[in-house]
């Protein structure tokens, strides 16, 4: 679809861009007194309008901007996830004591910019746009991770993030350029056609291109061994940003990775193609399976030793990337659906867990696990939801995390491939129980009910409870969520 | 009523737990009454089900089927037969009695009673589910309250005991999850329905890693169930969890939770994979005998009364396994009657052991509440001179006549004295075992002797001999304590002299299961 016509299908993103410009201008002319409040309100309003535009958006039936972006139900599913995550973070930011000392007006602006990048990531199907969208997200995230300007950990976190980010996106760009060199086009579908016609077995360049692209995606979703930035960045960044990074860019990374790999390296132009394209002697599924097994094992084993709850959750998020990759080894609708379902559930439970970390930090200034002692008796309204989130992360019923894991394992078992990975996956769940239980233990098993209670923050507690509802609800009745996922499984393909 | 009774049985306690959220702070008294009320009503419903249960039918009764998640073919499917009926009644009875036994809990009573009710719901759900997915959900849901009940209200080593219990059982159940999914995806059309799967599962014909898939599924299920039973060598979580748990939780652990392992084997492994069951039966018998002897030998070595009772559970569950192994009696040169004795005996022993061990743990709780220790050594036997004459009991029969009477009766039931319920079911299991695995059973029967050793010795050390001055001031059992033990004792005596009401419930289902296992097998001609 030509550019001008495409604009009408690009309204949410256009509006986001326009509102960012407006917010910058307002910010400049505003006195320092009301800045934070006004900018936050404007940003929330921008989110609301974006949500409305996304809601009324119609399906163009073809890729917009000459095939660069796909406005399909698949991308819309992820855009809703990004909107929800951003809205939650906007909501809790003024209640985060870490951020009270700094001016927050720019913070909202950067979050909007990151969300714009995420929107592009969900839709991109052109090599250039893919790279651009990842960079938009990354650069915004670098700044946000270092937002606590006086805090050395935050500075370190930002710097590490920049270095790792620059390196891995450089490698990825090189891989993308190899792909372009082979195919002569930046469009993913052209790449697929070209690959199908030119390659024979043992094509080393293609193998190199694939692995380099995997490095880029691996960095974004914190896949081992490209996860080394994760714990430091998660620990140093403001906790709101940690929460955001752990769900939104990760979801976008998966969305983009599945689209790119599925289209360019699929056996045919249908999506999903049900069969990986044979890249030389390399079975793509096996490569991903190895990464998946490594990622979940590394994440879980390192999480055991952590004493900082934020760091522990960082490693746990690495492990969860491993679980989701498990399904990505198979290229079919079931696998795609399982990953999407899990990402939606993961959004709720991980955001919830991090909000509890924020609240505890606000109240007690703690991050060390031993300082959570007796929280179950002091703040039951927060500790009980935390328990629900942790059990959901472990994958125990009746929580949505259990259902999500069942779907992930189902992918492997129904395809009758990678049994070893399924066994490794369930054993990893048992390992993960150990460190999640450590948090439960200090909250509930240690300390005595003294009758002493701490006043909780109503708005934060309300948001935490609100996130607990879907975790429990989809644990016993997940048809609505699965229905939405199934309806969103339509990925744009040129044929129809 | 018929179709909704099982739903009511399962979710009534959940309702009770929800009701507790609305009780204002400081009304601690109310929590007990709510818990007692809801479990009491549940028990009444369970009695009604037992009364209305058609003993002449081998079909599932009170069945309810409703679509739950159609896209995954998960159904809300419940029903009971002669295998689940005794377990349902046992669960309801022991839950109610445990609440009464928990009357003195003062630490965070809201949490305690709410978790207890959730535990009750989970257990009940396991025994009535006929959909594997539903079964699995209940199976896992039960772990959470159990973890907290041991971990918060338990003894000095409670944290370690709780996490060990949780990790062990989760390890077993995740393997079961894979087996469940494999069964689902290999059946055509995909189903979790445990009845449909009977005709589907044995058709699986796939190899994995050079092993037949059916065997992998069997072992994955077996490990999950074996950890719960617990079968040697997966039993190490049990003594710890039992000793650290508060009395009422020990009652539930030993009385109901252990039965889930054998129940799962009989409900899922036996009918779904009969070929593997038949081949594995001899191993099951061996494991059963090891359990009997190992459990009893360990029990003899204990100086902590509660640990002794915990190990006696290991021993008694071994008898259940031996009875279950007799399903292959005909094949091993025995008779159909032998198989029937063994299988019926196994289920009856599950029920009887539930009642007896519950009574044992309650009695341990009674003495612990008074003396705050459970050592069963002669006061003069302490090597440590400082403790000599201070710890340990002796001559308690003088001061606590009612208590010593109860203990005597329950100990005798535990060691299998005729005219008490334990004798009947143990004898049936051994007879069934003898018709099938002669040498093994002969070895196993030595377990009875060993059981007598530790029970009698414990009795002697606690109640006979010269009284220890230190414990002369203990009060005898209160009316509440007598009230919670009386129903158990009545059942022990009643089923000891007249077991047929219980056997009538069980037998048709078990006889069918024996035929199913032997007939459906492709090894039938061998």
Image (cartoon, grey):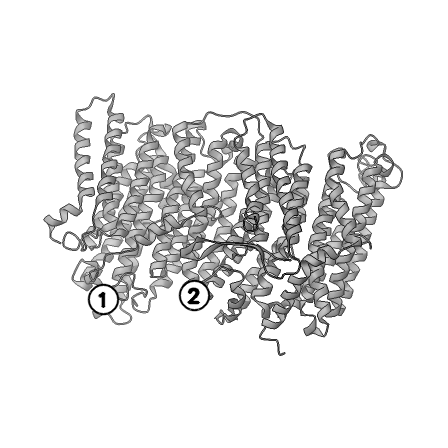
| A14 relative to B267 in the view: left or right | left
Which quadrant, please, contains the C terminus of chain A?
A: bottom left
Cα separation, mark 2 vs mark 1, equals 28 Å
- Residue A431 position, x and y percent, is 50, 50
**Mark 1, chain letter?**
A
Residue A229 vertical position relative to residue A490 in the rendered view, above or below: above
Closer to the N terminus: mark 2 or mark 1? 1
Q: Are marks 2 and 1 in contact (CB under 8 Å)?
A: no
Q: Is residue A46 visible?
A: yes
- Which label number is shown at residue A416? 2
Q: Is residue B148 visible?
A: no
Q: Which residue appears at 50% of the width and 39% of the height?
A: A439
| B11 relative to A344 in the view: left or right | right
- Residue B27 position, x and y percent, is 59, 26
Q: Which residue appears at 68% of the width and 61% of the height?
A: B507
Foreground: A21 or B204? Answer: B204
- Residue B263 position, x and y percent, is 62, 56
Q: On the image, numbered disc 1 is attached to which residue?
A: A195
Residue B124 vertical position relative to residue A146 in the rendered view, above or below: below
Find numbered disc 2 in the image and state the secondary structure of the residue it sits on: loop
Quarter of the view holding residue B296:
bottom right
Quarter of the view holding residue A467:
top left
Quarter of the view holding residue A235:
top left
């Amino acid at each position: 679809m030509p550019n001008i016509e495409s604009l009408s299908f690009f309204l949410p993103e256009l509006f986001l861009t326009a509102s960012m410009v407006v917010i910058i201008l307002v910010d400049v002319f505003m006195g320092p007194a009301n800045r934070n409040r006004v900018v936050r309100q404007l940003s929330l309003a921008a989110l609301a309008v974006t949500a409305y535009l996304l809601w009324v958006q119609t399906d163009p039936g073809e890729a917009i901007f000459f095939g660069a972006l796909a406005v399909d139900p698949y991308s819309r599913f992820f855009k809703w996830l990004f909107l929800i995550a951003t809205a939650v973070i906007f909501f809790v930011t003024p209640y985060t004591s870490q951020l009270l000392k700094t001016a927050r007006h720019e913070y909202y602006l950067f979050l909007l910019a990151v969300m714009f990048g995420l929107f592009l990531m969900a839709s991109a199907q052109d090599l250039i746009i893919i790279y651009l969208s990842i960079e938009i997200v990354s650069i915004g995230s670098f700044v946000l991770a270092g937002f606590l300007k006086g805090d050395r950990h935050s500075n370190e976190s930002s710097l590490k993030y920049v270095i790792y980010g620059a390196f891995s996106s450089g490698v990825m760009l090189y891989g993308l350029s190899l792909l372009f060199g082979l195919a002569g086009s930046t469009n993913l579908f052209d790449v697929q056609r070209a690959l199908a016609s030119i390659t024979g077995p043992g094509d080393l360049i293609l193998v190199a291109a694939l692995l380099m692209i995997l490095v880029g995606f691996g960095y974004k979703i914190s896949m081992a061994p490209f996860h080394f930035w994760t714990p430091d960045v998660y620990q140093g960044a403001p906790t709101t940003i940690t929460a955001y990074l752990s769900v939104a860019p990760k979801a976008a990374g998966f969305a983009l990775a599945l689209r790119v790999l599925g289209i360019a390296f699929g056996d045919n132009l249908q999506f999903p193609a049900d069969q990986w394209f044979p890249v030389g002697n390399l079975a793509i599924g096996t490569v991903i399976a190895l990464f998946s097994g490594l990622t979940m094992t590394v994440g879980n084993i390192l999480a055991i030793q952590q004493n900082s709850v934020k760091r522990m959750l960082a490693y746990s998020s690495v492990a969860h990337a491993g679980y989701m990759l498990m399904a990505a080894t198979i290229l079919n609708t079931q696998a795609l659906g399982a990953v999407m379902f899990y990402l939606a559930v993961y959004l709720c439970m991980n955001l919830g867990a991090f909000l509890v970390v924020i609240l505890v930090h606000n109240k007690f200034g703690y991050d060390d696990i031993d300082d959570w002692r007796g929280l179950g008796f002091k703040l039951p309204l927060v500790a009980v939801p935390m328990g629900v989130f942790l059990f959901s992360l472990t994958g125990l019923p009746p929580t949505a995390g259990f259902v999500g894991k069942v779907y992930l394992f189902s992918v492997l078992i129904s395809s009758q491939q990678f049994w070893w990975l399924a066994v490794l996956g369930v054993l990893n769940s048992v390992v993960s129980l150990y460190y999640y239980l450590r948090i439960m233990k200090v909250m509930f098993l240690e300390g005595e009910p003294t009758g002493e209670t701490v006043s909780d923050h109503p708005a934060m507690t309300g948001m935490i409870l609100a996130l607990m509802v879907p975790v429990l609800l989809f644990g016993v009745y997940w048809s609505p969520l699965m229905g939405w996922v199934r309806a969103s499984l339509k990925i744009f393909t040129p044929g129809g | 009523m018929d179709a909704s009774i099982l739903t009511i049985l399962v979710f009534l306690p959940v309702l009770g737990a929800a009701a507790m959220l609305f009780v204002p702070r400081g009304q601690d008294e109310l929590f007990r009454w709510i818990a007692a009320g809801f479990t009491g009503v549940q028990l009444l419903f369970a009695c009604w089900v037992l009364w209305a249960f058609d003993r002449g039918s081998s079909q599932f009764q009170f069945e309810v089927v409703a679509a739950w998640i159609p896209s995954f073919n998960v159904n809300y499917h419940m029903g009971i037969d002669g295998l689940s009926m005794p377990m349902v009644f046992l669960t309801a009875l022991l839950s109610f009695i445990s609440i009464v036994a928990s009357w003195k809990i003062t630490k965070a009573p809201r949490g305690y009673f709410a978790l207890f009710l959730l535990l009750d719901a989970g257990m009940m759900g396991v025994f009535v589910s006929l959909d594997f997915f539903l079964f699995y959900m209940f199976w896992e849901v039960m772990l959470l309250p159990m973890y907290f009940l041991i971990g918060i209200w338990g003894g000095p080593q409670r944290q370690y005991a709780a996490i060990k219990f949780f990790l062990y059982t989760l390890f077993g159940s995740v393997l079961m999850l894979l087996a469940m999914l494999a069964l689902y995806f290999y059946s055509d059309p995909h189903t979790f329905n445990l009845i449909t799967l009977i005709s589907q599962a044995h058709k699986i014909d796939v190899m994995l890693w050079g092993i037949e898939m059916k065997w992998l599924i069997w072992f994955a299920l077996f490990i999950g169930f074996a950890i719960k039973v617990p079968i040697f060598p997966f039993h190490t979580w049990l003594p710890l969890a039992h000793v650290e748990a508060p009395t009422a939780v020990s009652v539930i652990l030993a009385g109901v939770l252990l039965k889930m392992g054998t129940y799962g084997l009989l409900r899922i492994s036996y009918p779904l994979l009969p070929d593997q069951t038949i081949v594995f039966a001899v191993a099951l018998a061996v494991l059963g005998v090891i359990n009997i002897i190992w459990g009893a030998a360990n029990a003899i070595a204990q100086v902590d009364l509660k640990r002794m009772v915990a190990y006696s559970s290991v021993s008694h569950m071994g008898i259940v396994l031996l009875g279950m192994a007799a399903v292959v009696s005909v094949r091993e040169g025995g008779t159909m009657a032998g198989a029937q004795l063994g299988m019926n005996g196994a289920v009856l022993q599950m029920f009887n052991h539930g009642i007896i061990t519950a009574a044992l743990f309650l009695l341990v709780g009674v003495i612990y509440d008074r003396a705050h220790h459970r050592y069963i050594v002669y006061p003069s036997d302490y090597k440590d001179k400082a403790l000599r004459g201070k710890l340990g009991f002796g001559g308690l029969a003088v001061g606590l006549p009612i208590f010593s009477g109860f203990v005597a009766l329950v100990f005798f039931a535990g060691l299998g004295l005729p005219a008490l319920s334990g004798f009947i079911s143990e004898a049936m299991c051994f007879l069934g075992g003898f018709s099938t695995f002669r040498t093994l059973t002969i070895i196993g029967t030595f377990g009875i002797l060993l059981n007598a050793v530790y029970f009698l010795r414990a009795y002697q050390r606690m109640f006979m001999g010269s009284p220890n001055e230190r414990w002369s001031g203990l009060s005898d059992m209160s009316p509440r304590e007598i009230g919670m033990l009386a129903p158990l004792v009545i059942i022990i005596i009643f089923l000891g002299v007249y077991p047929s009401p219980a056997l009538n419930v069980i037998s048709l289902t078990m006889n069918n299961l024996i035929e199913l296992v032997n007939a459906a097998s492709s090894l039938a001609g061998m």
